[in-house]
Amino acid sequence: MAQEQPQLQEMSFWDHIDALRSMLIRVVVFLVLVALGLFFLMPSIFDSVILAPCHGDFVLYRFFARITSSASWLPQFSTEGFNVELINIKLASQFFIHMSTSFWLALVLSFPFVLYQLWTFVSPALYSNEKRGVKLAFFIGCLMFFIGVAVGYFIVFPVTLRFLADYHVSQMVPNQISLDSYMDTFLMLIFVMGIIFELPLMAWLLGSLGVLHRGFFSTYRRHAIVALLVLAAIITPTGDPFTLTVVFLPIYLLYEFSAYLVPKSAAVVE
């Protein structure tokens, strides 16, 4: 540790700025290269991945159908006849969505690289014991983000799409879903779930600083359940208790996982 400290003092303010600039350039160049690759692959990605929840044979719909067919007390879920046809109502929308989706997917796929570059920037300012903790935090953060994105894609967005696409205030008003509306909801829900799944990491960091302890989660568990149910209802506006539970359960498990990660007492962790 004594050898690391002089190295930190040798770096001036402008040295830190130069290191930050170099790190940002590497991140931007990498993002642009990945986005360019995705731009050429985007037609196939749209057909096989992004638009997959529009069809009744999507993996989640088939799973729901098997579950409900074996339990008569659940509302029956059918994969037949569900097909969402998107329309484009603006001349340049498809081109701009092609570009923007390439960038956002590049950002998702490049998340580990971005975290690694951030690590290379901050690691020289840390001691050996601090590096071990931060390295673990970066790994957990990356893993939880991708788990959240997967939950958003395979569960939250399809359930939301299925409900809203079939919902009618009147049978005289057919649903014509625009490509812009579909992509806005798709990207928003997936990124929101990715961010929500970072909550255990934030709880762990706050627990390491002594701000949070396990008693806090126990005291406010009932309040949290109500708040998380409201959040699940907002994400999935449906009265079906089965689909609401599907969205609520992973969020609540995050709450319990966060409680497990923090210290039992309020004492500051050394």
Image (tube, helix red, strand yellow):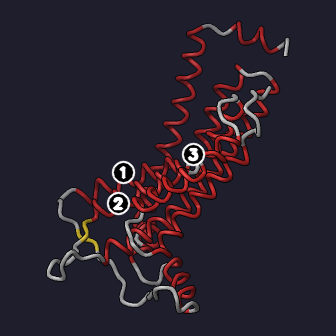
Give the structural element (helix, strand or loop) at label 3: helix
**Which of 226/102 is in front?**
226
Residue 100 is marked as 1
For the residues labelled 3 and 2, say whether their Cβ atoms are less than 8 Å apart: no
For the residues labelled 2 and 1, say whether their Cβ atoms are less than 8 Å apart: yes
- The numbered mark, 3 or 2, whose residue comes first in the sequence reads 3
Relative to 213, is 159 above or below?
A: below
Quarter of image, res 125: top right
Relative to 99, is 159 above or below?
A: below
Quarter of image, res 211: top right
Residue drawn at (53%, 50%) of the image: 223
Q: Residue 244: x percent and y percent? A: 47, 69
Residue drawn at (18%, 82%) of the image: 171
Give the structural element (helix, strand or loop) at label 1: helix
> Which residue, given by chain and number where applicable, does mark 2 sit on?
183
Residue 222 is marked as none
Alpha carbons under labels 1 and 3: distance apart:
17 Å
- The numbered mark, 1 or 3, whose residue comes first in the sequence reads 1
> Which residue, given by chain and number where applicable, does mark 3 sit on?
111
